[in-house]
């Protein structure tokens, strides 16, 4: 299994942090349930990938209820030039495993 380091930044209620992921390749968008805040989700969009160092950098785009964070993340990813789409991921801190929904980011 491939081990990636995901770096997250910009979330107003959280300091920048890193997380390890067992993924073949990082997706364009990542959603996570905020630890200690039931019903609150943070949405991040991938900014860059370093394939050699296996580091993916994500920046915060929205926080709130899933019904509002999802469209904000997809809209932000679709607004970036040359965005190829990819996997939309939901990182569930409680389960420890990301949940995937495959397809182009703009097709939700």
Image (tube, rainbow, N blue to C red):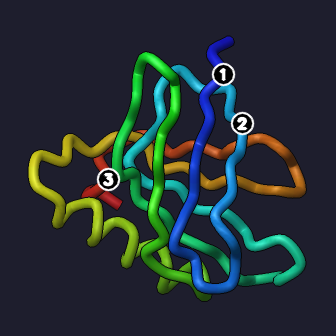
Mark 2 vs 3: CB contact within 8 A:
no
Give the crowd class for mark 2: few <14, some 14-19, many >=20 residues within 10 Å: few
Give the x, y percent position of residue 64: 60, 87
Q: Residue sitting at 82 percent across and 56 percent down?
A: 93
Spatial CA distance of label 2 from label 3 is 22 Å
Residue mark closest to the camera, 1 vs 3: 1
Q: Which circle's residue, 1 or 3, is located before the other in the chain?
A: 1
Query: Residue placed farthest to the top in the image?
Result: 1
Image quarter for residue 29? Answer: bottom left
Between discs 1 and 2, the one toward the N terminus: 1
- Distance from Cα at disc 1 to Cα at disc 2: 7 Å
Q: Is residue 34 left or right of residue 83?
A: right
Residue 74: which quarter of the image?
Answer: bottom left
Q: Residue at x 38, y 35 (%)?
A: 49
Percent across and percent down for residue 69 are 49, 79
Q: Which residue is mark 3?
A: 105
Dot 1: within a 10 Å radius of its alpha carbon, few (fewer than 14), some, or many (20 or more) residues? few
Residue drawn at (48%, 35%), measured in percent from left and top? 26
Left or right of 15 on screen, residue 49: left
Residue that label 1 marks: 3
Q: Quadrant of residue 36?
A: bottom right
> Mark 2, mark 3: which one is toward the viewer?
2
Residue occupied by mark 2: 20
Mark 1 and mark 2 residues within 8 Å of each other at the beta carbon: yes
Q: Secondary structure at mark 1?
A: strand
For this rendering, which residue is in front, 27 or 105? 27
The picture places residue 104, in percent across and down from the top left corner, at 29, 46
Quadrant location of the C terminus in the rendered image: bottom left
Q: Which mark is residue 46?
A: none
Q: How many labels sit on residues? A: 3
């Amino acid at each position: 299994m491939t081990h990636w380091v995901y770096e997250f930044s910009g979330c107003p209620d959280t300091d920048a942090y890193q997380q390890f992921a067992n993924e073949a390749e990082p997706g364009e968008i990542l959603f996570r349930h905020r630890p200690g805040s039931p019903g609150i989700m943070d949405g991040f969009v991938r900014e860059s990938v370093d394939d050699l160092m296996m580091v993916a950098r994500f920046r915060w785009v929205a926080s709130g209820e899933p019904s509002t964070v999802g469209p904000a993340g997809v809209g932000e990813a679709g607004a970036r030039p040359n965005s190829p789409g990819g996997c939309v991921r939901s990182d569930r801190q409680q389960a420890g495993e990301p949940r995937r929904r495959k397809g182009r980011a703009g097709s939700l």
